[in-house]
């Protein structure tokens, strides 16, 4: 038995998606309750109105969905757009469009559009995007989120911090973030790399000296501790500090006092210490190169920065960040990297971590002339050596073949989902499937 109009409208009003219909002149003929909620307009206000006057979407002028389905004779699915809410604010939506035909099915009498509100999704995306960039650091992986949270949690503390991580992981950026969010953010922030000074000069650099203290000391000089008074001192490569200097540093941490080189006057200082190292200090303690008591004084708040290879989900975000940076510097409009280049960047183990990735993209941007970086433009250390054209077929013997087949079966042969989990482009997955002769049986 055919459904009557009232019952049909009741069904459409029960849907969570907005639904409206138009006649062949693009005047609105039906407007369900979800459409009222999403747009802010009441049904009585819009019935009989041209849909473009109600929604004021850019698609109305550029590519009307109803006009498009009439022209192409194909329904539209999952088209992202934005409409104008009654209060004047733009509201992101995702819509589907289809033609309404007469009972004989031989001629269009109008169109129907269903749409859902993406405001909450867009807000979540924006929050995630903002959280991917924190005080100069870039990353949305769990490990980086934990570091961001920890930096915020210790913002009202003056306790010493020890940052550990491999070379190039961004330890100094973490130190910058700690200082920028701390109670001492408006006080001096002084940095010292302990590995660049000879032992006899490091004491002078940290504590200062008086005239005549040693050959070349022609006048009194403030040390970094005095420069950083009431602020923060960042000691990079702290594991390179000589044992005698470690003892002097320990005294400052315990008592807040020191003497300049060549002077017997004891001075007081109020400095927060942030230290960093790429070495295993427990090994240094075991071999006698690093004082255990100093380690515990520094390691009040430990932070371990993960290597890039352990957070591959951040690679694309870092690539986008560095592309913007180097495109701006070089005055080029480079927007992306192609699938093959992206695969190489994901497959590389990055022993030099973020610093190596940054250098690789600076190299590629310098060589690239178009808007997209291709694999051939990457540094030789990242590009694999040329291989014979006769690639191995899909005999099931390679780990790559087995992984691809397993993920394709897991996602019911949906290439988009499989490629996403593999961390490669859809085109690259298609090429590998072709090489391995992988196809759904």
Image (cartoon, rainbow, N blue to C red):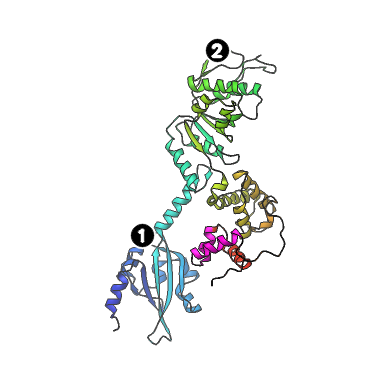
* Visible residue check, residue 222: no
Magenta highlight on residue 407: yes
SS for dot 1: loop
Residue 384 position within the rendered picture, expressed as x and y whole percent measured from the top left: 68, 54
Mark linked to residue 181: none
Return the residue nearer the eye: 365 or 403: 403
Q: Which residues are magenta?
A: 397-421
Instruction: Report the magenta stretch's main SS.
Output: helix
Q: Quadrant of residue 164?
A: top right
The front one of 48 and 317 is 317
Question: Would you say 346 lies left or right of 75 here?
Answer: right
Give the x, y percent position of residue 203: 61, 21
Q: Earlier in the sequence, mark 1 or mark 2?
A: 1
What residue sits 65% from the left and 15% below the top? 213
Which x, y percent locates residue 33?
A: 31, 68
Instruction: Identify the residue at image location x=45%, y=54%.
Output: 125
Q: Quadrant of residue 244?
A: top right
183 relative position to 436: left or right:
left
Which residue is located at x 36 percent, y 70 percent? 19
Q: Which residue is mark 1?
A: 87
In the structure shown, which secondary structural element does the residue marked by tag 2 occupy?
Answer: loop
| Residue 293 picture location, percent across and down | 51, 24
- Determine if the magenta segment contains residue 399: yes
- Residue 265 tag number: 2
For discs 1 and 2, the disc positioned in front in the rendered view: 2
């Amino acid at each position: 038995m055919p459904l009557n109009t009232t019952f049909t409208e009741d069904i459409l009003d029960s849907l969570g998606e907005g639904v409206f219909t138009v006649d062949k002149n693009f005047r609105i003929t039906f407007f369900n309750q979800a459409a009222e909620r999403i747009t802010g307009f009441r049904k009585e206000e819009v019935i009989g109105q041209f849909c473009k006057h109600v929604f004021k979407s850019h698609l109305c002028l550029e590519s009307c969905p109803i006009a498009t389905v009439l022209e192409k004779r194909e329904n539209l699915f999952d088209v992202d757009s934005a409409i104008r809410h009654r209060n004047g604010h733009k509201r992101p939506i995702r819509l589907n469009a289809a033609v309404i035909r007469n009972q004989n099915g031989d001629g269009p009498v109008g169109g129907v559009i269903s749409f859902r509100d993406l405001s909450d999704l867009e807000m979540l995306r924006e929050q995630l995007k903002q959280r991917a960039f924190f005080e100069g650091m870039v990353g949305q992986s769990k490990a980086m989120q934990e570091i961001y949270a920890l930096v915020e949690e210790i913002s009202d503390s003056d306790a010493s911090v020890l940052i550990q991580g491999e070379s190039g992981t961004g330890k100094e950026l973490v130190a910058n973030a700690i200082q920028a969010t701390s109670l001492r953010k408006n006080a001096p922030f002084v940095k010292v790399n302990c590995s660049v000074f000879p032992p006899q000069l490091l004491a002078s650099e940290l504590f200062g000296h008086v005239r005549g203290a040693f050959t070349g000391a022609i006048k009194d000089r403030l040390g970094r501790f005095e420069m950083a008074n009431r602020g923060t001192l960042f000691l990079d490569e702290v594991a390179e500090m000589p044992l005698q200097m470690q003892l002097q540093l320990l005294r400052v941490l315990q008592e807040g006092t020191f003497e300049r080189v060549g002077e017997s006057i004891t001075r007081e200082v109020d400095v927060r210490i942030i230290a960093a190292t790429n070495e295993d200090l427990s090994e240094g303690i075991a071999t006698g190169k690093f004082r255990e008591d100093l380690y515990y004084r520094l390691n009040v708040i430990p932070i371990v920065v993960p290597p890039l290879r352990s957070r591959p989900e951040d690679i694309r975000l870092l690539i986008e960040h560095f592309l913007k940076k180097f495109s701006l510097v070089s005055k080029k409009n480079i927007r992306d990297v192609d699938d093959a280049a992206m695969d190489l960047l994901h497959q590389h183990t990055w022993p030099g971590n973020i610093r190596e990735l940054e250098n690789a993209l600076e190299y590629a941007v310098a060589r690239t002339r178009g808007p997209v970086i291709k694999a051939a433009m990457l540094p030789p250390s990242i590009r694999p050596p040329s291989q014979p054209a006769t690639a191995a077929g899909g005999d099931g013997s390679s780990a790559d073949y087995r992984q691809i087949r397993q993920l394709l079966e897991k996602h019911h042969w949906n290439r988009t989902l499989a490629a996403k989990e593999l961390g490669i482009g859809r085109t690259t997955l298609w090429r590998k499937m072709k090489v391995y002769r992988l196809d759904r049986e």
